[in-house]
Amino acid sequence: MPEKSAPEAKSKPKRSADSAERAYQTVRKLLVEFKLRPNERINEVQLSRELELSRTPIREALNRLASEGFVQFAPNRGFHVRPLSTDGLLDLYELRAIIEIAAFRLMVERAEEAELDRFAEFWRSVRDGYQMRAPDEILELDERFHMLIAELSGNLEIPVQLSAINARIRFIRRIQIEHVSHDTNQVHAHDEIVDAALRRDLEGGEAALRRHIEMTVSATQRALKDALFQVYEAETSPLQRRKKRAARKETPEVEK
Amino acid sequence: MPEKSAPEAKSKPKRSADSAERAYQTVRKLLVEFKLRPNERINEVQLSRELELSRTPIREALNRLASEGFVQFAPNRGFHVRPLSTDGLLDLYELRAIIEIAAFRLMVERAEEAELDRFAEFWRSVRDGYQMRAPDEILELDERFHMLIAELSGNLEIPVQLSAINARIRFIRRIQIEHVSHDTNQVHAHDEIVDAALRRDLEGGEAALRRHIEMTVSATQRALKDALFQVYEAETSPLQRRKKRAARKETPEVEK
DNA sequence: GGTCAATAAAGTGTCGACAAATATGTCTTC
DNA sequence: GAAGACATATTTGTCGACACTTTATTGACC
């Protein structure tokens, strides 16, 4: 029960635990979980009270998040949570597909035999019972599967870019995996990709990869409805309190 | 003209000119021009003296530069200028080629006729005398040419990513354009690309684009030697002063 | 002479304070 | 009652100060 936690606030004047990093992780989590909602303005002072930090490390964290696309910045009017648009997400998926397919191509062209074996070995080691795992685990394993391809491409920028993109779509992927019946096609698709890689079959692997990603996208589109519901209907966010004056003009009329 | 020498410091208490932005632009320039050299440690205090700002906006600028890959960050030991490695650059170019070729493909598949015309029109308007222009202009026009393709892809993430990548290779491109005899092939290549786009010729355009980029890369490799020379041999950098103690123990002995 | 430890110097990380800028509320005028 | 002008409150931008880490210097010891 992380309920209270707060009252003895100044308990630890312990300073040096890299506040900026902590702020980054925390705010990122808030964003991923929709505790901070799309389009919402981010109030630095309020955040700094919540996290019991000064604004400096929070600002630093927000800057990082802005460069990753989680939030947007406008001079003299601070940070806003990036709006949640279908188009934007599909663009991200498309870009991801572009880079991943290129990565596969490079991997097939360049990787040593031993490296490909390592790739196949990884998949074999997690293949059984893949669908049975917890959603978070599936998500992580799938990401590692694709990240391995990126690494074996031999281009060091590719995994960097890809993980940046993944970070931005992970929140929706989580919803997708939880909500959609993730059929065994996922396993089959991975099988196909691994086989094609071992055979160094460019065309086949590319096609399989493309199918796999397109399937993920359509599953995501379905999931997006759920996400939008979760965001705009469900009541969440301990941060969301508006302790504003709401008590003032109590005209209980057309309630929202 | 008062010879007050030093105390003119606080001349302009003029505050509000978005120091962070100014710091960002200035430091970025220093990096691009090798005034701050690869691998060099960046001293925040020193920089803040040079720019006559406090460390806060400088830190903000450095964070942005770090997320763009210009500098690297290590907790408790600050920022370093990103090392200048051939491998890293080639990886970036490769990634750029991947995204650009995909953008071309999408453009050909999706763009309206009128948009393609706009693209062709842009190139026509700058084509004549292209090689005669100043290096900086050529660089900018070339970037706009490619950025137009990215925009017409219809994927909003593509121009974003591409301009981030461009930012990281621009410094070397500038050197390349200045040093290498930029033959007319550049113009011819652009011609080919525009023609292919108007014909909606996927294969031809892709091939032309690939050739164009590969040519740029090899030119860059040649330029890299010059760059390394410029960095490690030439004497530059008014920032480089070591006003250390040198005056203190004047023991004109063996000393280094 | 070289290695290591203690100590000093330099540099980074975070804070609280205040100025500039923007948003909100109130009053006046029509 | 609406639009605009002014005053007030909130929020962001920057600063200087200081605590904590890392790095350089000194000196003891082998």
Image (cartoon, coloured by chain):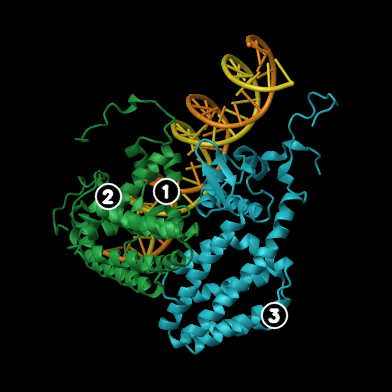
Chain colours: A green, B cyan, C yellow, D orange
- Determine which of the numbered discs, if any, sits on residue A35 in the image: 2
- Which quadrant of the figure has residue B124? bottom right
Residue A177, position in %: x, y? 23, 59
Secondary structure beneath label 2: loop
Query: Taking A30 as reference, is D30 left or right?
Result: right
Spatial separation of the CA atoms under disc 1 and disc 2 = 15 Å
The residue drawn where x is 55% and y is 37% is B77
Q: Which residue is mark 3?
A: B184
Q: Dot 1 falls on which chain?
A: A
The kind of residue tagged 3 is Thr
Residue B51, position in %: x, y? 65, 45
Spatial separation of the CA atoms under disc 3 and disc 1 = 46 Å
Q: Quadrant of the N terminus of chain A?
A: top left
Q: Earlier in the sequence, mark 1 or mark 2?
A: 2
Label pair 1/2, CB-CB below 8 angstroms: no
Crowd class of label 3 (few under 14; some 14 to 19; many from 20; radius 10 Å): few
The residue drawn where x is 59% and y is 52% is B22
The kind of residue tagged 1 is Leu
Q: Which residue is mark 1?
A: A62
Question: Please, which residue is most extreme toward the bottom here?
Answer: B199
The mark closer to the camera, 2 or 3, is 3
Residue A60, position in %: x, y? 46, 44
Q: Quadrant of the C terminus of chain A?
A: bottom left
Please state which of residues B22 and B234 is positioned toward the viewer in this rendering: B234
